[in-house]
Image (tube, rainbow, N blue to C red):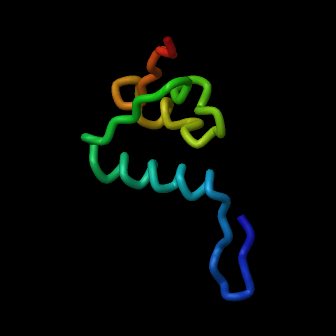
C-alpha cells in the first residue's frame, strides 16, 4: 500500500476485500466462507489467501465445481 498526499493509504480492490473479510471473520465467528478454490488456493484473485490458515477449515471451505 502507498500513502497518498492526503495521508490515507491507497489499496487495491483485492486488498480492501481481503481486509474486510478478515475484519468480519475476526469480529463474528459465525461468518463462514464457501467457494470454489478459496481455501488452499486462495481464490482466483487471491482474495482469500491465508484465510484458511487464519480461521481454519471449518470456516473457510472449498466447494466442488458443479457446472453441468
Toward the front, the furthest residue is 68
Q: Quadrant of the N terminus?
A: bottom right
Which residue is rendered at x = 47% and y = 37% of the image? 54
Count of numbered labels shown in the rendering: 0
Q: Position of residue 28 (x, y in %)?
A: 28, 48
Which residue is rendered at x = 31% and y = 53% of the image? 27
Drawn side of residue 53 relative to residue 58, left or right: right
For the residue pair 35 and 66, the one nearer the viewer reads as: 66
Toward the left, the furthest residue is 30
Q: Position of residue 67 (x, y in %)?
A: 51, 15
Image quadrant assignment for residue 30: top left
Drawn side of residue 13 relative to residue 52, left or right: right
Image quadrant assignment for residue 3: bottom right
Toward the top, the furthest residue is 68
Whether 18 is drawn above or below 65: the answer is below
Drawn side of residue 46 relative to residue 19, left or right: right
Drawn side of residue 14 relative to residue 3, left or right: left
Which residue is rendered at x = 45% and y = 49% of the image? 22
Whether 6 is drawn above or below 68: the answer is below
Which residue is rendered at x = 61% and y = 25% of the image? 41
Whether 38 is drawn above or below 48: the answer is above
Q: Position of residue 53 (x, y in %)?
A: 50, 31
Q: Position of residue 14 (x, y in %)?
A: 62, 51
Amino acid at each position: 500500500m502507498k500513502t497518498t498526499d492526503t495521508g490515507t493509504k491507497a489499496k487495491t480492490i483485492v486488498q480492501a476485500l481481503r481486509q474486510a473479510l478478515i475484519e468480519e471473520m475476526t469480529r463474528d465467528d459465525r461468518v463462514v466462507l464457501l467457494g470454489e478454490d478459496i481455501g488452499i488456493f486462495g481464490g482466483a484473485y487471491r482474495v482469500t489467501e491465508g484465510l484458511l490458515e487464519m480461521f481454519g477449515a471449518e470456516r473457510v471451505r472449498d466447494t466442488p465445481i458443479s457446472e453441468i
